[in-house]
Amino acid sequence: MPRFLHTADWQIGRTYSRFAPDDAAALAEARFTMIERLAQLAVDEQCEAVLVAGDVFDAQTVSDRTLRRAFNAMSAFSGPWVLLPGNHDAALAESVWTRALRLETVPANVHLALEPSVVDLSPQGIMVLAAPLTQRHTYEDLTAVFDSLQTPDGLLRIGLAHGSIQGVLSESVDSPNPIAPDRADRARLDYLALGDWHGAKQIAPSTWYSGTPEPERFRNNEAGFALVVEIEGPGAEPKVTSHRTGQYQWHQWHETLQVPTDLDAVLARLEALEEPAVVDIQLEGTLDLGGEAKLDQALSVAQGVHRSVECDRSRLRLLPTEEDIAALHADGYLGEVVAALREKAMDDTGAAREALVILAGLLRDRQSRGVNGEGNP
């Protein structure tokens, strides 16, 4: 019973400029260790082959070192790998693929599907019908060639393509490259392995997107998986099993704080996250000084646990309560400054808010030193 691993959208060489340098480096490195995990998964699941449905590399200009590292990371699985060019690494006349061949870095068990063709994996019971992208964008369905490609009887017909299923992926697709939704039926395919949509998604019983095996953006679309596909024989319905492969899970939250329990809910959610994660929190609404201090403490703890935790508070208004102001023991001129900043912060989410937070922190520190005997009470 043939069994193979379906994966796509590795985008090796991707950079993460929005993150701090150490986080960006770790996220880029995770894409190499991801290949190692895929190779081990193929071994553990006793797969006959690994099919990669496009965008192996993030760009044509990745370094020679990146090329070598990517191919070396496949070494744990000695069976055949079939790599398909996608829109990020299209099979141009001069491309990342031709460079890899010149460098002689492509292992003997790795098949580069650089033109529409049938990749013969008959020892594994599989014939792979490949439709590589030969330019970044095309407006014709390159999988139409599958209808006329002939394969021997008794072997599985597996399509491998990269693009957007027409009428299904109308939102935020990476490329316009169209694929007919009924291509598997038209071409008598036993399975159509797709790339381009970065989340695992079933289109039909025998048509799947595997998604990227390592999440790389804030989108809740089942990223971070690879698919093990098992088919009893030609004409049988595939059995598809999803396996989590991502090292980092990405989370983005937009939250409005109106009452103290709203903040408690956000912090409880943050504490419950499976580590390590990449987290982006955007807050709006209102917060008092006690809540601000609680938020600072929770973020500090989370940043020591997770890969990256960022919190945008630019739309969050700081509204100290009367109890907050009284607790600061700001008398005289200092009290007048605190009161003025408080009034300004009610209508301003910028400088006044930041100034009030800093001043409140200094006053709390002064009180703490006084209580601990390190200064005048």
Image (spheres, grey):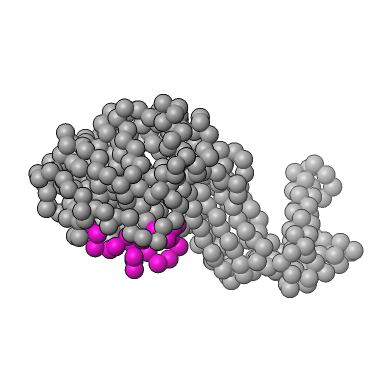
Magenta range is: 165-184
Residue 234: image location, x then y, percent: 12, 49
Residue 368: image location, x then y, percent: 74, 48
Relative to residue 371, is residue 125 depicted above or below?
above
Furthest-left residue in view?
154
- At 36% from the left edge and 31% from the top edge, which residue is drawn? 74
Residue 185: image location, x then y, percent: 19, 60
Image-based side of 365 in relation to 13, left or right: right
Image-based side of 221 in relation to 341, left or right: left
The N terminus lies in quadrant:
top left
Residue 268: in magenta span? no
Task: Please identify the dominant SS of the magenta region.
Answer: loop
The image quarter containing residue 187 is: bottom left
Relative to residue 143, is residue 342 depicted above or below?
below
- At 44% from the left edge and 29% from the top edge, which residue is drawn? 102
Residue 114: image location, x then y, percent: 36, 42
- At 64% from the left edge and 61% from the top edge, which residue is drawn? 313
Residue 309 seen in the current view: yes
Residues 262 and 138: in front is 138
